[in-house]
Image (spheres, grey):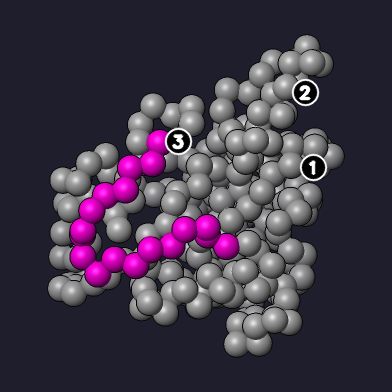
Amino acid sequence: MGDRPASQFTSVQHHIPLYSLENAFDAAELRKWDERWRKIEEVLDAAYVCELKIDGSAIALTYENGLFVRGATRGDGTTGEEITQNIKTIRSIPLRLSTENFPECKIPAHLEIRGEAFIPLDTFAQINQEREAAGEALFANPRNAAAGTLRQLDSRIVAERRLDFLPTRWNFPMGCLCLRRSNPRASGNHWNCFSTWGCGSIPTVSFAPVWRRFWPTLRPGIANATTCPI
């Protein structure tokens, strides 16, 4: 599921589909998913890298020789919207990648970084206070507010909303290097690269050779608990 690209924006074709994540609401559903992908990929032994899901809006950032050249929404998963000027207002997204403190993280000539643009909860509360004081309608939740903000035609409005960004994976022109397909223990180096490049990093990462226990995390404003296998 996704949004149909709006006519006011230039359409961007994702060379690798940018799909949304599946949900699993209990251990049984999670194990069914585990069994299904192992069967499809013919994998018997696997380990997992687990992270907290940031409840925002998926975006794709394109870099050429370390310079940010294009930002796009997820759209319908295959076609998104070009929102480069809006992305440039997000301070946690670097316009130039750096390897100053971690030379091992070499920057590919052509690189796409995918992740979540979101409005932090404290920022969201402050924005709603400002809107209330101005007599404007309050935003219902941070996720919808972030998605709507990214599609604003005036980038000055986007800057005022103070969005943040966390990366989740990178892609190369010839294919996808999904973090979960590499060695989970080595994947920490990928997050180190994100941090070194100036893209931020996932705050919580756990390595799980098997299903051991489930970590329920209540998200403010959302009735369901989120479970991450660790």
Amino acid type at circle 1 is: Ala
Q: Secondary structure at mark 2?
A: helix
* Pointer 2 or 1: first along the chain: 2
Residue in the picture at 58% in, 23% down: 140
Residue in the picture at 63% in, 53% down: 165
Q: Secondary structure at mark 3?
A: loop
Residue in the picture at 50% in, 47% down: 54
Circles 2 and 1, Cβ within 8 Å, touching? The answer is: no
Amino acid type at circle 2 is: Glu
Above or below 199: residue 175: below
Q: Which residue is mark 2?
A: 130
Neighbours of disc 1 within 10 Å: few (<14), some (14-19), many (20+): some
Residue 93 magenta-highlighted:
no
Q: Is residue 124 visible?
A: yes
Residue 126 coordinates in the image, percent (x, y): 71, 29
* Pointer 3 or 1: first along the chain: 1
* Pointer 2 or 3: first along the chain: 2
Q: Alpha carbon of mark 3 to alpha carbon of mark 1: how far?
A: 25 Å
User: In the rendered image, which quarter is residue 222 located in?
Assistant: top left
Residue 185 coordinates in the image, percent (x, y): 38, 77
Q: Which residue is mark 1?
A: 159
User: In the rendered image, which quarter is residue 201 located in?
Assistant: bottom right
User: In the rendered image, which quarter is residue 196 located in?
Assistant: bottom right
Q: Which residue is mark 3?
A: 219
Region of the chain picked out in magenta, as a range? 201-218
Image quadrant in which the C terminus is located: bottom left
**Does 181 sit left or right of 221 as displayed?**
left
Residue in the picture at 43% in, 69% down: 178
Above or below 197: residue 125: above
Which one is in front, 151 or 92?
A: 92
